[in-house]
Amino acid sequence: MLIGTGGDWYCDICNPFQYATSIMGDPVQRKAHIKDATDFFDELSHGHLPAVSYLKPDSFGDGHPASSKLDIFEGIVQRVLDGLKAHPELAESTAFFITFDEGGGYYDSGYMQPLDFFGDGPRIPMIIVSPFTRGGHISHIYADHASFLKFIERNWHLKPLTARSRDNLPNPIAAPANLYMPLNSPAVSDLFDMFHFDRDQDHHDRDDNDR
């Protein structure tokens, strides 16, 4: 999904699904899944969304130093949060993942896994807003942008996007001395360590104990 004021703002390398033949090679899949950001916000304003949505701002709104400003990106994030807050029943079942394309060029002393021919890059911020996340939890398990795909595939019992994409990599086995450096490299997290999906059961158990 893209946001912008004109064609000049379109980022022709920023939509990962335009490189998947299973989507771009099928007119029905393209029509069903390649949408504009206005469609996303229209659905959000009516209190319903697809099971999974990728919202990718274009060059004008992505916070990238070369073409945007961080507060514009923050405004888009705030708009999504406000939309969820306006529909509590939707917010109760939603996990909102917020991340960046790059780390801004700053030096990073963190370990970078040689995942494949393209390697991997410096760490970037990633925040999950959801009633199912573990409040105040900071994950030290090695993750990657492909971790979002791994999460989706595990949660909905789907196969990897392709036979050679990073979502085929296993979950990391953390080294005792350095949780961020997997013993079974190359490996990337599916982000499930950041969630608490038995939350509702815990609530029922507490209610039963209070009676």
Image (cartoon, rainbow, N blue to C red):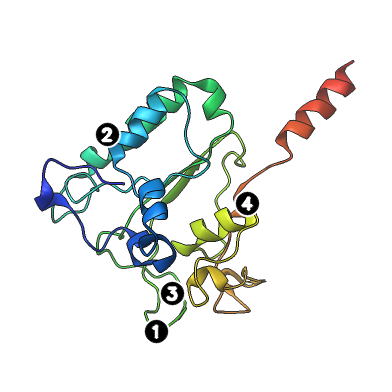
Alpha-carbon distance for marks 1 and 4? 29 Å
Element at badge 4?
loop
- Residue occupying the point 19% across, 51% down: 59
- Residue occupying the point 35% across, 67% down: 19
The answer to the question of whether label 1 and label 2 lie on touching residues, with beta carbons closer than 8 A, is no
- 10 Å neighbourhood of mark 3: few (<14), some, or many (≥20)? some
**Based on the displayed image, in which of its 4 quarters is residue 183 positioned?**
bottom right
Q: Nearer the viewer, mark 2 or mark 3?
A: 2
| Residue 169 visible | yes
Element at badge 2?
helix
Mark 4 or mark 3: whose residue is earlier in sequence: 3
In the image, residue 19 sits, relative to residue 119, either above or below, namely above
Q: Looking at the picture, which amino acid does disc 4 mark?
A: Trp
From the top left corner, tell me how far across and down residue 115 is, in percent.
Answer: 47, 78
- Residue occupying the point 41% across, 60% down: 23
The residue wearing badge 2 is: 75
From the top left corner, tell me how far across and down residue 28 is, in percent.
Answer: 41, 52
From the top left corner, tell me how far across and down residue 99 is, in percent.
Answer: 39, 51
Mark 4 or mark 2: whose residue is earlier in sequence: 2
Alpha-carbon distance for marks 3 and 1? 13 Å
Mark 2 or mark 3: whose residue is earlier in sequence: 2
- 10 Å neighbourhood of mark 1: few (<14), some, or many (≥20)? few
Alpha-carbon distance for marks 4 and 3? 29 Å
Question: As rendered, which of 66 and 18 lies closer to the eye?
Answer: 18
Alpha-carbon distance for marks 4 and 2? 30 Å
Position of residue 139 in the picture relative to residue 24 (left or right):
right
Q: Looking at the picture, which amino acid does disc 2 mark?
A: Gly
- Farthest residue in the front direction? 27
The residue wearing badge 3 is: 112
In the image, residue 131 sits, relative to residue 177, either above or below, namely above
**Based on the displayed image, in which of its 4 quarters is residue 86 positioned?**
top left
